[in-house]
Image: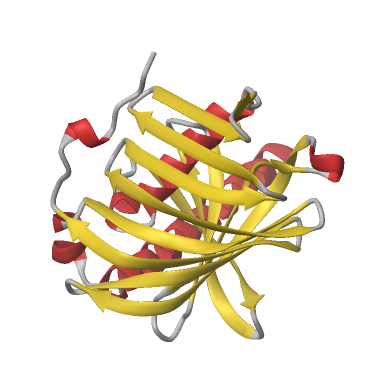
Amino acid sequence: MRHWFLGLAVAVLGATAAAADEKAEAVVKKAIEAHGGAAALDKYKAGRFNMKGELSLMGLDIAFTGKLAFMSPDRYKLEMEADIMGQKMTVHQTAIGEKAKSTVVVGGMTIPVPDSDKEDLKMSVALQEAEQFTPLLDKKRFEITAGPDEDVEGAKASVVTVKIKALNKEAKFYFDPKTGLLVKSAHKTTGPGDGGAPAEVLEEALHKDYKKIQGVQTSTKQVVFHDGKKFMTLEASDIELLEKLDDKEFTIDD
């Protein structure tokens, strides 16, 4: 009897997981169509844009500007500048395959970055690709599972958990069930904790102000929270979606 019961439990759990996977696939396929269709999303695997916004850091609201370039699956470059109490801060992040480097300079002094920064940067690269949505259907690289609907800004959202197999890490994507558009993403990362010391935080980003760019619905504004507290507002402009970028745009100095 015990063996029969265990066998039944395994069968039920297996069926539930299969149903969740089928639901997740349906949600992702709807998202692909909502954001412009597979042909457009697969065509534009690279892009660049300018950005501006505000960081909330140690009680200060810090305006910043910058630019970001990417090329899926593994090219990423971020450049950002800000002024902190009269001191210029620059941030450079670059990833090429397994190589990743971050540099932070404040007032002409290079600031050590935590060891976790490299892994966080790799996660940013993986999420950049995942948010093209068609790669999520590649079962060798991503595992997607549907979760219970959750509330996002007062409206129901369809939830898909995304496991990035190469990193053994997870993120959650939240989609508007009516439009299919991505309205929120969430994952664990490293952020400034109490007193500014690095700490693991839950980063949640609201994706807003969609515009159709070269046939692709693209979010032009993100509001980012760390452990429920507003951390950053980012607005993108001069967005270019491209089939590819020159590898020379992504270089890492040894």
Residue at left offset 79%, top offset 35%: 197
Residue 253, image x, y percentages: 36, 19
Q: Is residue 1 visible?
A: no
Residue 102 screen position, x and y as percent: 50, 30
Q: Is residue 142 visible?
A: yes
Q: Quadrant of the N terminus?
A: top right
Res. 89 image quadrant? top right
Q: Position of residue 204 (x, y in %)?
A: 62, 60
Residue at position x 37%, y 40% from top? 77
Report the front residue among 41 and 96. Answer: 96
On the picture, is 54 further left or further right than 191? left
- Measured along the vertical axis of the image, is residue 92 above or below residue 234? above
Q: Quadrant of the C terminus?
A: top left
Q: Residue furthest top?
A: 254
Which scheme is used to colour this image of the protein?
secondary structure
Which quadrant of the view contains residue 218? bottom left
Q: In this orientation, which residue lies closer to the viewer: 224 or 187?
A: 224
Determine which quarter of the picture holds residue 170. Answer: top right
Where residue 25 sits: x, y (%)? 37, 61
Q: Is residue 248 above or below residue 78?
A: above
Residue at image position (23%, 61%) is 240
**Left or right for 235, reference 187:** left
Mark count:
0
Nearer to me, 242 or 39: 242
Extreme front residue here?
86
Q: Is residue 85 toward the left or the right of residue 238 in the image?
A: right
